Amino acid sequence: MRQGSDEARYYLDPQTGALLRKVDSDARWNRWLVAALHRGDFSAMARSRPVWDLFMWPLLLGVTLTCATGFFMGLRRLFRQRRSPRRHANPATGDAILVQAGKALR
């Protein structure tokens, strides 16, 4: 069986010869994006429980840390806009500008 970029693989039932599954490049991408990334089904070796745990826990902790970081950044931005106005230096003139919720007030 040759493996080209646009060729399909056909899986046949050995007893009847019936077509069980056709896998093209879209189906291969779907397998990697869904089965591998969402379920941790990368290879037969990684399906054994201790290896799967050692592989998945760092990935899950990284995703959790990324989500928590984005959540706290969003909270900081929401509460920063509600605070009292701040004075910032105008880069062009050096004058102080009163800034409130993203608007220059002078």
Image (cartoon, rainbow, N blue to C red):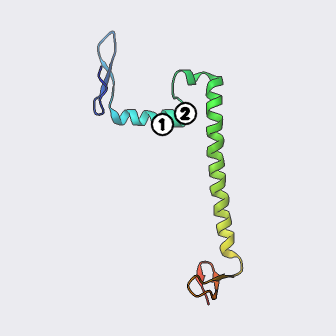
Q: Quadrant of residue 85 in the image?
A: bottom right
Residue 54 x/y as whole percent: 65, 29
Q: Earlier in the sequence, mark 2 or mark 1?
A: 1
For disc 1, the neighbor class at 10 Å (few under 14, some 14 to 19, many from 20) is few
Residue at (57, 25) in percent of width and height? 46
Q: Amino acid at mark 2?
A: Arg
Q: Are marks 2 and 1 in contact (CB under 8 Å)?
A: yes
Q: Secondary structure at mark 1?
A: helix
Q: Which mark is residue 73?
A: none
Q: Secondary structure at mark 2?
A: helix
Q: As displayed, is residue 85 above or below residue 61?
A: below
Residue 94 x/y as whole percent: 62, 86
Disc 2 designates what residue?
39
Disc 1 designates what residue?
34
Direction bottom: furthest residue = 106
Q: Amino acid at mark 1?
A: Val
Residue toward you, 4 or 24? 4
Please identify the quadrant where the N terminus is shown: top left
Residue at (63, 88) in percent of width and height? 95
Q: CA distance from mark 2 to mark 1?
A: 7 Å
